[in-house]
Image (tube, rainbow, N blue to C red):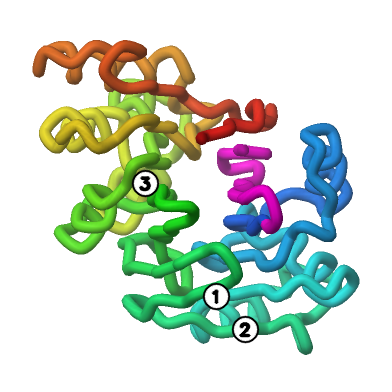
Amino acid sequence: MSLASGSSGNCYYLGTERYGILIDAGIAARRIKRDLKEAGIGMEMIHAVFLTHDHLDHVKSVGTLGEKLNIPIYATRRTHEGIDMGHHSTKRLQTSRHYIEKGTPLQLRDFHIEAFEVPHDGTDNVGYCIEADGKTFTFATDLGEITPTVATYLRKADYLILEANYDEEMLRTGSYPAYLKERIAGANGHLSNRAAAEFIADNMNGKWRYIWLCHLSKDNNLPELAHRTVAVKLAEKGITVDKDVRLTALQRNVPTELYLFE
């Protein structure tokens, strides 16, 4: 379930019948609690939060979740240091602070979790490859390009959550200052619709069942445009969306349904 996906906040839930985890916590804790409750999920089911990096739209409520609700907060050591230096949270992480290392698998309850390097301009940045109940989910958000390392983990997935942040023409002609346009389009910035579409179309191997396009820009993208860009590239390869693979562009501030997979 995506609770939020975009520059205003990011938070994703992944769970089994018994346990759940969050990927990022960039929205208010009360909103997380409300949206999960509406999906029939209590906070007592959340056994950890895994952070991709230290930008505010990914870590806003980690202090409350970690220190008030006693939920372990996992991130690389440098990401935790970045959160401390950024003063992003009213509550400092103390007892809830836990460390992960890129490329070193972690077993937590029903989840086998491995963090991997992604190129972005946070203090430290990771994606996650998570296996639960025989299904593999790969989260890759906030990355300027798909490196060979990232590609390896994307190809492992049955279910893929991949950034499609901006449309190149909308960014080029938009109102952002030049330095910000360069940052977004750079190798440590964000992934474009075209780059996501080309990778997906070139690497379809029959393994991906669902693909969610995440972290769409408010000013430089549209859900229907991101969806269409990928769908057209897939069609060029003879792959039909909603027949051969499910494709969804996630809304920035609207939770998705709770997807159930047997």
Q: What residue sits right under mark 3 in the picture?
A: 190
Residue at 55% x, 75% y is 75
Residue contact between numbered discs 2 and 1, judged by CB atoms under 8 Å:
yes
Residue contact between numbered discs 2 and 3, judged by CB atoms under 8 Å:
no
Reading the chain from its start, which is encountered first: label 3 or label 1?
1
Q: What residue sits right under mark 2 in the picture?
A: 98
Residue 75: which numbered mark, if any?
1
Reading the chain from its start, which is encountered first: label 2 or label 1?
1
Reading the chain from its start, which is encountered first: label 2 or label 3?
2
- What's the distance in space between the residues labelled 2 and 1, CA to CA? 7 Å
**Which amino acid, mark 3?**
His
The stretch drawn in magenta includes residue 203: no
- SS for callout 3: loop
Determine whether 108 is above or below 222 in the image. below
Residue contact between numbered discs 3 and 1, judged by CB atoms under 8 Å:
no
- SS for callout 1: strand
Residue sitting nearer the eye, 109 or 78: 109
Residue 140 at least partly seen: no
Residue sitting nearer the eye, 57 or 141: 141
- SS for callout 2: strand
User: Quick one: label 3, few (<14), some, or many (20+) residues within 10 Å?
Assistant: many
- Disc 2 or disc 3, which is closer to the eye? 2
Residue at 44% x, 73% y is 124
> x and y percent of residue 103 in the render?
32, 76
Residue at 68% x, 58% y is 19
- What's the distance in space between the residues labelled 3 and 1, CA to CA? 20 Å
What is the number of callouts on the image? 3
Please provide the residue range marked out in magenta: 1-19
